[in-house]
Image: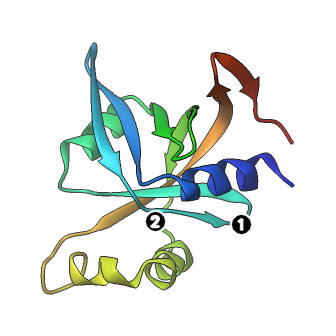
């Protein structure tokens, strides 16, 4: 199983996750829920109207953290790359059709899709850290 699939499976088992970006020299954290695998990359999304979008454009180094319902947590860090190709957007709406209710021509809101590169991920259970690798 690939590293991307392992991370995706772990995050899928969690009740959402937290996404951290930087606002200048200050960290900013917020809950996230959307993710997908597309072309063997781990994708996420955020509205272009949000501060998180501006922050990631200014500094693409991000981190994700989630608690597993059975105990332990995962921490994922990487570099965000926005990818707004029509096929990525179409797959996002296929994976999560409810996003169309908020992000559509009528609302004028746009969901920016991005994937992570240079991913470093680890899980921690009982204070034991384990790297997630291919």
Give the left or right position of residue 16, taking residue 104 as reference: right
Q: Residue at x 20, y 85 (%)?
A: 105
* Label 1 vs 2, first from the N-terminus: 1
Quarter of the figure with the N terminus: bottom right
Q: Give the residue pinned by disc 2.
A: 84
Tell me the crowding category of disc 1: few under 14, some 14 to 19, or many 20 or more residues within 10 angstroms, Cα based: few
Q: Quadrant of residue 28?
A: top left
Whole-Å distance between the Cαs marked 1 and 2? 14 Å
Q: Residue at x 25, y 76 (%)?
A: 103
Q: Residue at x 63, y 16 (%)?
A: 127
- The disc at residue 61 is none
Q: Give the residue pinned by disc 1.
A: 39
**Image coords of residue 109 (percent x, y):** 19, 70
Instruction: Please name which of the two marks, 1 or 2, marks the residue nearer to the observer.
Output: 1
**Image coords of residue 19 (percent x, y):** 39, 39
Asked whether disc 1 touches disc 2, contact meaning CB atoms under 8 Å apart, the reply is no
Image height of 10 relative to 38, above or below: above
Q: Nearer the viewer, residue 30 or 47?
A: 30
Give the left or right position of residue 114, taking residue 129 as reference: left
- For this orientation, the residue located farthest to the left is 107
Q: Nearer the viewer, residue 5 or 23?
A: 5
**Image coords of residue 74 (percent x, y):** 58, 35
Q: Residue at x 54, y 72 (%)?
A: 88
Image height of 60 relative to 70, above or below: above
């Amino acid at each position: 199983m690939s590293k991307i699939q392992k991370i995706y499976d772990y995050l899928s088992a969690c009740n959402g996750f937290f996404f951290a970006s930087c606002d200048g020299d200050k960290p900013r954290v917020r809950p996230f829920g959307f993710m997908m695998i597309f072309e063997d990359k781990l994708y996420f999304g955020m509205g272009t109207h949000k501060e998180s979008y501006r922050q990631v454009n200014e500094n693409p180094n991000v981190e994700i953290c989630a608690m597993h319902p059975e105990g332990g947590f995962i921490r994922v860090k990487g570099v965000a790359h926005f990818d707004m190709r029509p096929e990525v957007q179409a797959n996002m709406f296929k994976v999560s059709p409810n996003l169309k209710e908020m992000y559509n021509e009528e609302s004028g809101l746009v969901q920016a899709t991005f994937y992570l590169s240079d991913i470093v991920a680890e899980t921690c259970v009982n204070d034991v850290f384990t790297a997630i690798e291919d």
